[in-house]
Amino acid sequence: MSGAGKETTPLRAVDGWQLPRRAAADPYVASVPEAPSLLGISKDLAYDLARRGELPGAFQLGRRWLVSLIRLRAAVHGAEDDRAQDVG
């Protein structure tokens, strides 16, 4: 088996987003390590953005960082709408 020791997380579509199965169980909240799979960024960048307050919907619960997927989706779709208006 190639990639021994590396565990891949199966993805599942929820509202058009490919979410890791654990995040798909609660489609409203994901952990910061799961957010990069949604945004196409690295885990380190996601944590850095969360700490700086620049990851939409990110909040800290104890020592754990989570992301409100509702806020993240709104920010992503808002950015897409802004780009569409700039082009059109």
Image (tube, grey):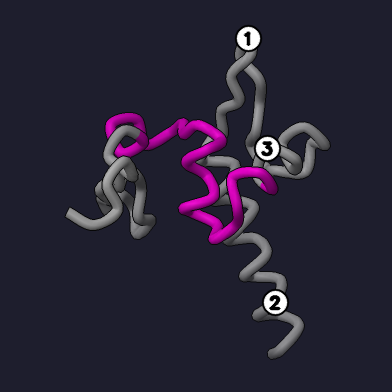
**Position of residue 33 measured from the top left corner of the image (x, y, whole percent):** 52, 38
Query: Magenta residues, as a range?
Result: 23-45
In whole angstroms, how far apart are the C-alphas of marks 1 and 3? 15 Å
Residue 83, numbered label = 2
Q: Classify mark 2: residues with Cα within 10 Å, few (<14), some (14-19) or many (20+).
A: few
Q: Position of residue 57 (x, y in %)?
A: 63, 36
Q: Residue at x 71, y 89 (%)?
A: 87
Q: Assess whether mark 2 and mark 1 are in contact (beta carbons under 8 angstroms).
A: no
Describe residue 88's horizontal placement relative to residue 12 as left or right.
right
Three-letter residue code for mark 2? Arg
At label 3, the amino acid type is Tyr
**Residue 26 in the figure: left or right of residue 52:** left
Amino acid marked by disc 1: Gly
Q: Mark 3 points at which residue?
A: 47
Q: Residue 62 carries which label?
A: 1
Q: Foreground mark, 3 or 2? A: 3
